[in-house]
Amino acid sequence: MYVAVKGGERAIENAHRLLANARRGDQSVPEVTLDQISEQLGLAVDRVMSEGSLYDRELAALAIKQARGDLIEAIFLVRAFRATLPRFGASEPVDTGAMRVQRRVSSTFKDIPGGQILGPTFDYTHRLLDPSLAEGFVPETPATAEASTAPTPRVTDILGRDGLIESSPEAEDGASVGDLTREPLNFPADRDLRLQNLARGDEGFLLAMGYSTQRGYGRNHPFAGEIRFGEVEVEFSAEDAGFAVPLGAIELTECQMVNQFKGSATEAPCFTRGYGLAFGQSERKTMSMALVDRALRARELGEEALAPAQDEEFVMSHSDNVQATGFVEHLKLPHYVDFQSELGLLRKLRQEFADANAPDAMKEAAE
Amino acid sequence: MDQVTQHNTQQAQRKAAMAVLAHAEAGEIAARLRDLTLPAHQDLRTPENGLVMLRGRVGGDGAPFNLGEATVSRAAVRLASGEVGFGYTLGRDGEKARLIALCDALVQSRDFGGLVERSVIAPLRERLMVKREQAAAETAATKVDFYTMVRGEG
């Protein structure tokens, strides 16, 4: 039970004024601009868009600024904002095969058509702090090379041609696409809802869950079949225009995880798959997502589901950091009456304990 | 050309123009339009911001799922001669949506279709291609060239 507490208005107002000052910091230091956040803290913006579940770089940058760099607070702000706008509809599903690839690596095949393209990556850096970045750093102009016009097919498509990997599930005729922002979540949940949940799920939570599968809690022998990052075009079937209109492009990261075989008396053994997709450049997120997606398919693939990462109710109920932080942080709010009743109960129990353990002599005397 | 083919050709043209315009800034489109003498037109739908749920596919090529939303701005413009254009773009720039709608209406106009293609769409397409080619060249430089270390004899 919560009680309305009166009398805190002035304190609250002043606390928010103090927050505004703390957010601004030393005013002799120039104020950070949204462009600076978007351009120079781009991966933070990507994370806020992914987990805030809203693709809008400028709004995500504003949220990061308002939240003083607290990304979960920023995600909360973005989620709240999206509730203020009407929804026009749903896009045509994006085609990641037609991505303008900026990075694309496979740990399963060295010579993939289209090649291994490293792009802008932290991989192979030495993770040494670079003092030259502290101020006035001007990067060298990027090197260029002749771009190939060869297509970059998904690695899973290549494996699929020989039947070595399961094919992706097709949409059932007339089946609607589940949307957990519109309907309450029920279990068991289908893969569309699971992927939507994971796509907006907390990166840290998914990382830990994915890691747990690697350490043996629901082991499924993953290989990073392919990770790709780049721009894809988005189209929207506009009723008024009467055709699918181009909306522009978004940046996405996709991870195709290739996992241990399945097979049966009637089906030849083949690799299974886990899938990850997220806004922006989010490799850790999509890799973790793909590991967890695969783990959550345990039931469907006839595996024993004993590990936390295989328990869809556990994973899906705890992946959302806005829900999680709301429930954890609400403990800060006044629980005075609640606590008073607990206190009363505890005093009563302690009295009973004291009475029961009193020396027999005293009991007899009392009687 | 029969009517259906004509309709499809025009739709393809409109889509191709929109695919360029959606990637341009509102200011760039406005600057190109400023040099033209435009026919009378009016807003049929004033710019409006909203959301579109972006969809992916399971495994990249399977059944669709909801990935997350994006902000989208839309508008509609009608020329005095009757053509109605629609403008849609990612983001919250209503003016850009209105300019795309205006261009879409002009693309459909017998008198202005060629002009808007030459003076607005083509130069913006050119800029977009240059940008994309530059990005592709920078990406290509990070492609790994594997070579095999050959062991010496013996």
Image: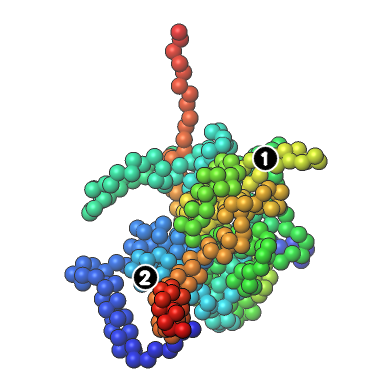
Residue extending farthest to the top is B154
Q: Where in the figure is residue B119, as x and y percent of width and height? A: 50, 64
Relative placement, left or right, of A7 versus B21 is left
Quadrant position of the N terminus of chain B in the picture = bottom right
Residue extending farthest to the right is A266
Instruction: Please tell me whether mark 2 sits on a helix, a strand or a loop.
Output: loop
Q: Is residue A270 above or below residue B69?
A: above
Quarter holding residue A163: top right
Query: Is residue B120 visible from the viewing direction of this image?
Result: no
Q: Tell me which chain the residue with mark 1 is part of.
A: A
Q: Which residue is mark 2?
A: A67
Q: Where in the figure is residue B87, as x and y percent of width and height? A: 56, 72
Q: Where in the figure is residue A90, as x and y percent of width and height? A: 63, 68
What amino acid type is highlighted by mark number 2?
Answer: Ala
Q: Where in the figure is residue B142, as x and y percent of width and height? A: 44, 40
For label 1, the crowd category at 10 Å Cα-Cα, with few meaning under 14, some 14 to 19 and many 20 or more, is: some
Query: Is residue A36 visible from the viewing direction of this image?
Result: yes
Q: Is residue A270 above or below residue A182?
A: above
Relative placement, left or right, of A168 versus A29 is right
The residue lying toward the viewer, choosing from A323 and B101, is A323
Quadrant position of the C terminus of chain B in the picture = top left
